[in-house]
């Protein structure tokens, strides 16, 4: 008989035979994932056993293949764009652990293997921390150099950035510490002078050209080699951690291209940061290193524990905050976070922070761009501006989310999304042309935040510190009393106001383009500018009206009551800046320690956009060491979150997950509708009957026909079509691989062979082909609910157990099935959204 009737549904054609889409939209562009699958499915050696027969039993009778005794390679793995079965993966890991524990008592070698298996998790965390810290250090150094390259070059060596170039110069003065003979602007190199309108135009032109070159290289590399390298990466990582599979998203090519293009994108001057992409880079490192360890390579649930720890590593190297990174992973991205993952995340974050500290990318022997300790107390009445900043931060966050999602939706649904390279170049050109005339937008975002951080000591020559001269008495503190603002301060306020509007608008269209782009730094810049404006206003108010009730008793004349610049320190520290803080590199000039009047301003804006609270406070504490300022920080952050939640409960990452249609069940979203399982299950009344497989009544040909005619990811197994009594559930992928493997390895298996899912195989008629026993691939305990189960309970079951599907029964009879996609569509319908926006199962 013919033995090739299954060629139309071989394992190699699995990817085109399921209900999952062949194309998926990542960050707004339609991408063909099968051309960039740099990480193949697990154990993809299914044809290796084709030349080996299963052997003959006694008297030459073909041996019955039982998958319980002889596992088939590929069974239990998942296709691309599918959700893993958390319950099955955890069960597999428990069985593996029990087997290792049992064998460890038999010999010393088995005991050593058991110890090695237990230690492998910590070794993997060590490798992830070392690799991520090294890459982060290289990104920081490269981005700093390329950012300065837009303005000039060092004659001593083109690889030196501006500050490192001037460190070695003996002709640098303290008053003009940004100028040195070794550093030449492009106008000086081309026209011989840095003064005059022609030199200004030449510097302007070179600034725009370098920005366009960097952005063009970034978007071209992303488009040509790794489409997954665009965007922040956090929405997709949240989806992957929830159990969804996107092969190649955390692969080696994505890592290489993301690392290179992140440097280019940041150096181009676009309004973006590198914190979110650093989380993606760390997760790529973890995913690649997981292939070195069998228990993580072959178990998707165990791998996601490592990815959760890697997310903490990414934040650790981005902010220099290991504990904050662990809390970020727990609060914002992780779906399953057991206690052992907490400790391993902390260990990996610690290793990554130590590695970054050893590289010392900022030249100040610290994890962050600068470090400041606070000594002055804050006053209770300062909570009023704190709360005002929190309110503004919440409004800005809600505005940004809605505006950015509207723009990204327009990009997805119009011809704009068909020209990603042109879009990036246009936005870069607009950004560079508008940024160069304003000194506060021309500088990198990190330098901007550092400038706003400046506390205006006696030796500062910044435009923001050009106050009117008043007689002051020298004290042990470097802080100066409140003074009237000079003309340069008012000019700086106008420039900062324009910079605030510019940053708010340009960030909306920048985030989501086809280049690596983070959101933390631009949001912090918006908060820093707004807080500085309010801080100067409060300072002048306290100076001219110190006899008012709100200032009386704690703000006497000649006292340093208000410090408008300290809040900007948070944003500058968080950015792990592209350039070093100027004062920190000058010997014998200590960083000024001043009261934290508006310290929480910057982070209140981040809380409005991302809706994070706890991890932000801890990151802030790690950056500053200012424990006494946690209370005002918490007040502003919570105010920002409350205001933003009142205007819209979705954070930016959740909004992008919904925009892209990822199958993600948000744990924070409540389901309050009174619907039942029968209202959501399939098939509906007008649908054809549910496709099922009987436990002993179907042939190989029948099952092949069922697979070819449907696109379902799995099939319930019942006693018979008449009784519909549930026996178990079998995955489509496992069926395809098992049947093809049996045709290759078991002699005599043909289309007429019977398939049994029973424990014992009944006697077969004479001269009949050998049967195929597939009980080993069947889930004998699928999750079931009754048709009258409330949907809020069903949703909780899916969230807490990570189910792919749940079967619906009535008095033991199978009625239908509820998948994760069905629940997401139902929730979208109940929220008056388009249910067809959910792309995948």
Image (cartoon, rainbow, N blue to C red):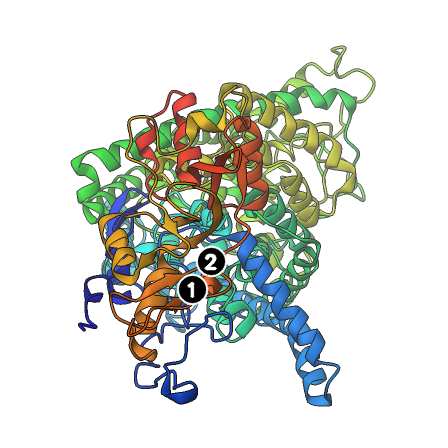
Residue 704, which numbered label? none
Crowd tier of the residue under label 1, counting other residues whose Cα lies within 10 Å: few below 14, some 14–19, many 20 or above:
many
In the rendered view, does 526 fall on the left or right side of 130?
A: left
The residue labelled by disc 1 is 774
Residue lying at the far front of the rendered structure? 766
Residue 630's place in the image compared with 212, above or below, is above
CA distance for labels 2 and 1 = 7 Å
Crowd tier of the residue under label 2, counting other residues whose Cα lies within 10 Å: few below 14, some 14–19, many 20 or above:
some
Q: Which residue is drawn at 32% across and 51% down?
A: 515
In the picture, the quarter occupied by the C terminus is: top left
Residue lying at the far right of the rendered structure? 553
| Element under disc 1 | loop
Determine the image quadrant of residue 635. Answer: top right
Percent position of residue 74, x then y: 40, 68
In the picture, the quarter occupied by the N terminus is: bottom left
Query: Does residue 162 appear in the picture of this structure?
Result: no
Query: Does residue 335 appear in the picture of this structure?
Result: yes
Percent position of residue 536, x then y: 59, 26
Residue closer to the observer: 2 or 477: 2
Residue closer to the observer: 581 or 576: 576
Determine the image quadrant of residue 384. Answer: top right
Q: Residue at x 36, y 72 (%)?
A: 44
Percent position of residue 336, x then y: 59, 49
Residue closer to the observer: 548 or 111: 111
The residue labelled by disc 2 is 778
Percent position of residue 807, x then y: 47, 40
| Element under disc 2 | strand
Residue closer to the observer: 116 or 438: 116
Q: Residue at x 64, y 43 (%)?
A: 615
Q: Are marks 2 and 1 in contact (CB under 8 Å)?
A: yes
In the rendered view, does 456 fall on the left or right side of 784?
A: right
């Amino acid at each position: 008989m013919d033995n090739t009737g299954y060629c139309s549904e071989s394992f190699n054609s699995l990817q085109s035979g399921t209900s999952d889409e062949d194309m998926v939209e990542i960050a707004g562009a339609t991408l063909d994932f099968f051309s960039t699958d740099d990480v193949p499915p697990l154990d993809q050696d299914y044809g290796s056993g084709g030349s080996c027969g299963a052997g003959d039993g006694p008297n030459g009778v073909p041996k019955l293949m039982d998958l319980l005794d002889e596992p088939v390679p590929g069974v239990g793995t998942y296709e691309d764009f599918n959700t893993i079965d958390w319950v099955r993966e955890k069960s597999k890991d428990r069985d593996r652990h029990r087997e290792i524990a049992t064998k460890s008592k038999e010999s010393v070698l088995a005991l050593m293997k058991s110890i090695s298996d237990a230690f492998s998790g910590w070794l993997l965390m060590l490798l992830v921390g070392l690799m991520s810290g090294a890459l982060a250090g290289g990104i920081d150094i490269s981005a700093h150099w390329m950012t300065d390259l837009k303005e000039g070059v060092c004659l001593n060596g083109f690889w030196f950035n501006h500050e490192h170039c001037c460190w070695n110069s003996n002709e640098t003065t303290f008053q003009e510490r940004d100028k040195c003979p070794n550093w030449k602007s492009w106008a000086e190199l081309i026209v011989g002078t840095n003064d005059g309108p022609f030199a200004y135009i030449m510097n302007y032109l070179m600034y725009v050209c370098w920005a366009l070159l960097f952005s063009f290289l970034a978007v071209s590399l992303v488009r040509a080699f790794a489409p997954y390298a665009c965007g922040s990466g956090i929405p997709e990582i949240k989806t992957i951690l929830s159990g969804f599979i996107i092969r190649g998203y955390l692969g080696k090519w994505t890592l290489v291209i993301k690392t290179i293009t992140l440097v280019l994108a940041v150096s181009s001057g676009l309004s973006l940061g590198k914190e979110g992409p650093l989380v993606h880079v760390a997760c790529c490192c973890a995913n690649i290193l997981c292939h070195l360890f069998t228990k993580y390579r072959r178990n998707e649930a165990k791998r996601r524990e490592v990815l959760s720890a890697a997310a903490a590593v990414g934040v650790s190297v981005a902010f220099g905050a290991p504990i904050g990174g662990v809390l970020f992973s727990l609060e914002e991205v992780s779906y399953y976070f057991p206690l052992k993952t907490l400790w391993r995340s902390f260990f990996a974050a610690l290793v990554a922070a130590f590695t970054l500290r050893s590289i010392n990318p900022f030249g100040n022997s610290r994890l962050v761009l600068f470090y400041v300790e606070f000594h002055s107390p804050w006053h209770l009445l300062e909570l009023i501006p704190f709360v005002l900043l929190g309110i503004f931060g919440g409004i800005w966050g809600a505005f940004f989310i809605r505006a950015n999602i509207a723009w990204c939706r327009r990009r997805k649904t119009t011809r704009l999304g068909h020209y990603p390279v042109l879009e990036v170049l246009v936005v870069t050109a607009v950004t560079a042309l508008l940024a160069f005339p304003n000194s506060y937008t021309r500088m990198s975002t990190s330098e901007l935040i550092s400038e706003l951080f400046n506390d205006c000591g006696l030796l500062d020559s910044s435009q923001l510190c050009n106050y009117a001269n008043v007689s002051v008495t020298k004290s042990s503190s470097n802080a100066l009393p409140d003074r009237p603002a000079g003309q340069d301060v008012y000019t700086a306020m106008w420039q900062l106001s324009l910079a605030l509007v510019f940053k708010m608008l340009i960030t909306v269209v920048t985030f989501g383009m086809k280049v690596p782009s983070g959101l933390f730094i631009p949001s912090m810049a918006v908060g820093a500018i707004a807080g500085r404006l309010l801080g100067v206003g409060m300072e002048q108010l306290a100076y001219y009206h110190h006899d008012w009730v709100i200032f009386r008793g704690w703000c006497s004349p000649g006292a340093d009551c208000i410090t408008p610049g300290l809040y900007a320190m948070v944003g500058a520290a968080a950015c792990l800046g592209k350039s070093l803080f100027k004062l920190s590199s000058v010997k014998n000039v200590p960083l000024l320690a001043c009261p934290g009047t508006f310290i929480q301003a910057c982070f209140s804006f981040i809380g409005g956009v991302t809706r994070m609270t706890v991890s932000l406070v801890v990151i802030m504490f790690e950056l500053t060491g200012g424990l006494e300022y946690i209370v005002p920080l918490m007040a502003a952050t919570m105010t920002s979150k409350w205001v933003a939640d009142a205007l819209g409960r979705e954070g930016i990452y959740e909004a992008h997950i919904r925009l892209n249609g990822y199958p993600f069940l948000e744990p924070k979203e409540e389901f309050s509708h009174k619907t039942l399982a029968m209202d959501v299950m399939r098939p509906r009344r007008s649908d054809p009957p549910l496709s099922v497989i009987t436990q002993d009544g179907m042939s190989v040909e029948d099952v092949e026909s069922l697979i070819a005619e449907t696109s379902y990811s799995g099939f319930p197994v019942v006693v018979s079509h008449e009784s519909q009594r549930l026996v178990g559930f079998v995955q489509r992928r496992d069926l395809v691989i098992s049947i093809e493997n049996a045709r290759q390895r078991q002699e005599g298996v043909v289309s007429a062979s019977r398939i049994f899912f029973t424990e014992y195989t009944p006697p077969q008629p004479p001269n009949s082909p050998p049967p195929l026993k597939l009980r080993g691939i069947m889930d004998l305990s699928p999750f079931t609910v009754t048709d009258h189960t409330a949907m809020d309970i069903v949703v909780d079951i899916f969230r807490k157990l990570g189910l792919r599907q749940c079967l619906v029964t009535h008095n033991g009879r199978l009625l239908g099935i509820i998948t994760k996609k069905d629940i997401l569509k139902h929730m979208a319908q109940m929220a008056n959204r388009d249910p067809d926006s959910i792309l995948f199962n």
